[in-house]
Image (cartoon, grey):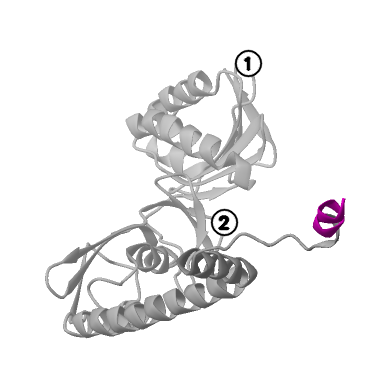
């Protein structure tokens, strides 16, 4: 009984843990409590290494770039209207770039911002040359008094450039430009047979056009069977004597089976079949 009481009141002894095991457990517990700080410290060290390496890499690349500056800009293309002084000034900033870092697309955009430049091709030529090939706009007609119509059907304004007297002049709404150009080509092909040439073609609406010829004669024509009516006029015109041709002022071709002539010395119109 006494032995039993003694055993009940005694504190049981903990089993002994080897020293090496206790150290490993302590390290694991310490790492667990300080894991966030350790990770943050490792990250900072890594960033410092990357930043240092990046700085040295940047310095090294900069030294390489400095050894290959753009030393020459070669401009190619037949240019009749482009201001070459302004062109050189626009290209000058790119002379400060280097062969590897220059942005060709930006050079292209700069060149195509010029009114008379239709298209630009830019490329590099080792080791220090920038080649720029330019295609100038080709005007096929004057548009109104201050603009031009390009071969692509684009209306553009050219500052300090007067209308070209050797080109026809088109007048109308901007959206009519392709239609006016098409009418000009078709009508001019008919009039050429009679030795006539269009100086001004004005489309007042979608069914009526006024043609001012280079000999001073005006023609009014509508959309319906316009080429047939124009052909009928040229056949009559070639029958007229030179004196009669000189007296022609205006011819209205909007009739189905005839035309109306306004003579320079007459007060009224004369219908002719």
Q: Which mark is residue 149?
A: none
Q: Overall secondary structure of the magenta stretch?
A: helix
Q: Residue furthest top?
A: 257
The residue sitting at 37% across, 67% down in the picture is 111
Residue 230 visible, this orientation: yes
Q: Position of residue 173 (x, y in %)?
A: 64, 46
**Left or right of 70 in this view: 176:** right
At x 49%, y 26%, the residue is 230
In the image, which residues are magenta? 1-7
- Look at the image and tell me whether residue 85 can be seen: no
x and y, in percent, of residue 242 in the image = 38, 39
Q: Mark 1 highlights which residue?
A: 256
Q: Which residue in the protein does label 2 denote? A: 144
The relative height of residue 32 versus residue 202 in the rendered view (above or below) is below
**Left or right of 71 in this view: 40:** right
Packing grade of label 1 (10 A; few <14, some 14-19, many >=20) is few
> Who comes first in sequence, dot 2 or dot 1?
2
Q: Quadrant of the C terminus?
A: top right
Foreground pick, 16 / 133: 16
Residue 257 falls within the magenta-colored stretch = no
Q: Position of residue 263 (x, y in %)?
A: 58, 40
Residue 57, percent from left and from top: 28, 78
Magenta span contains residue 6: yes
Q: CA distance from mark 2 to mark 1?
A: 31 Å
Q: Classify 159 as above or below 255.
A: below
Front one among 129 and 251: 129
- Which of labels 2 and 1 is toward the front? 2
> Dot 2: what SS?
loop
Q: Is residue 159 left or right of residue 238?
A: right
Residue at x 85%, y 61% (from the top left corner):
9
């Amino acid at each position: 009984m006494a032995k039993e009481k003694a055993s009940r009141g005694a504190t049981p002894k903990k089993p002994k843990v080897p020293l090496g095991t206790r150290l490993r457990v302590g390290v694991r517990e310490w790492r667990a409590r300080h894991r966030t700080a350790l990770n943050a410290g490792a990250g900072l060290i890594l960033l410092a290494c990357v930043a240092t390496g990046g700085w040295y890499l940047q310095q090294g690349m900069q030294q390489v770039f400095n050894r290959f500056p753009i030393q020459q800009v070669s401009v190619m293309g037949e240019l009749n209207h482009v201001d070459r002084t302004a062109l050189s000034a626009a290209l000058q900033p790119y002379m400060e770039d280097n062969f590897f870092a220059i942005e060709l697309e930006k050079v292209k955009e700069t060149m195509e911002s010029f009114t008379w430049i239709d298209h630009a091709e830019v490329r590099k030529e080792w080791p220090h040359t920038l080649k720029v090939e330019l295609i100038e706009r080709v005007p096929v007609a004057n548009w109104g008094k201050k603009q031009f119509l390009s071969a692509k059907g684009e209306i553009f304004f050219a500052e300090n450039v007067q209308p070209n007297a050797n080109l026809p002049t088109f007048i109308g709404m901007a959206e009519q430009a392709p239609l006016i150009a098409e009418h000009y080509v078709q009508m001019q092909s008919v009039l050429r047979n009679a030795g006539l040439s269009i100086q001004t073609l004005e489309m007042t609406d979608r069914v009526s056009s006024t043609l001012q010829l280079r000999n001073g004669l005006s023609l009014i024509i509508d959309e319906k069977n316009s080429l047939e009516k124009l052909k009928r006029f040229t056949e009559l015109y070639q029958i007229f004597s030179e004196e009669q041709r000189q007296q022609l002022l205006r011819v209205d071709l909007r009739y189905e089976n005839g035309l109306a002539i306004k003579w320079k010395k007459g007060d009224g119109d004369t219908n002719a079949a």
